[in-house]
Image (cartoon, rainbow, N blue to C red):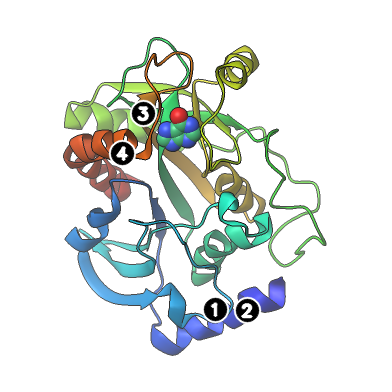
Amino acid sequence: MYNKLMKCLASVRERTNFKPDVALILGSGLGDFANEIDITDTIDYTDIEGFPISTVKGHAGRFVFGYVEKTPVVIMQGRVHYYEGYQMADVVLPTRLMGMMGAKKILLTNAAGGCNPKFKPGDLMMITDHITTAVPSPLIGANIEELGTRFPDMSEVYSKRLQEVIKTCAQKCGVVLQEGVYVQFTGPNYETPAEIKMAQSWGGDAVGMSTACEAMAARHMGIEVCGISCITNMAAGISKVELNHKEVQETADRISKLFKQLVSTIVVSM
Ligand code: HPA
């Protein structure tokens, strides 16, 4: 895996020498944030040998390099998910690669289902912690010593410092910010009502199909992590209507202007 990462890095370095400080992964509805920054370079994922490519419609796949004000950022416009059939180690390859490009901090974003009954669709939730019990760890397999230790600590995956930054930025942007624990499931199916009850009993506030594995891989290599979920729907059983991708996208699109404003404020304050 480390060799594969080094090959991907060489492939990136053939095209750009850009050194990002902040890495950003854009979830559903946020993709066009990348088009609004001061872009210096872009690299299509298909131009990086060995790179996992998303098969989901609307998940355009490329790295965008550039500046948000003075902050050098690398943005993943589109991510891969475990449900597409990749090994977890491949799912987090792009995250690791951004760390190897030089990113010291990462902001993860996603669309998620709300399982905290106090939430409503359109809410933004700062991730305070996560539960990945329902998916394999991306760190399974030979440890990559060059990146981090075999048994990494996960007692503060989401940086307390960055959580304070996010809260301050939310206030500045006039965003009412929820906070809570993100539970990752495999997808691609939405959860059953019984699974959502389980997630609630575990202490989960939101459920989704990404992010926690990326957060874990980033922590493993010492990157400072933070994350925000857009609650696009209430999770199965709480919502009395059937869940569908269209509803998820519609809510994500409805909130995207505010979300983008918040993300941009956070990136320059990280
Ligand atoms: N469950 C899992 N992932 C999701 C959901 C959900 O309800 N909504 C958006 N992503």
Lower sequence index among marks 1 and 4: 1
Looking at the picture, does residue 111 appear above or below residue 30?
above
Q: Given contact means CB atoms under 8 Å apart, are the residues at marks 3 and 1 in contact?
A: no
**Mark 2 touching mark 1, by CB under 8 A?**
yes
Q: Which residue occupies 59% across, 38% down?
A: 157
Cβ at disc 4 under 8 Å from ligand 1 = no
Identify the residue position indicated by label 1 in the image. 9
Q: Which residue is mark 3?
A: 231
Q: Is residue 45 visible?
A: yes
Q: Residue at x 53, y 43 (%)?
A: 188
Q: Amino acid at mark 4?
A: Lys
Kindly report the distance in space between the C-alpha atoms of the residues bearing marks 1 and 4. Answer: 36 Å
Q: Are marks 3 and 4 in contact (CB under 8 Å)?
A: no
* Mark toward the viewer: 3 or 4: 4
Cα distance between the residues tagged 3 and 2: 36 Å
Q: In the rendered image, which residue does mark 2 sit on?
A: 6
Q: Which element carries disc 4, helix, strand or loop?
A: helix
Check disc 4: other Cα within 10 Å, few if <14, some if 14-19, many if 20+: few
Precedes in sequence: disc 3 or disc 2: 2
Of the numbered discs 3 and 4, the one sitting upstream in the chain is: 3
Q: Which quadrant, please, contains the N terminus?
A: bottom right
Q: Which residue is mark 4?
A: 246
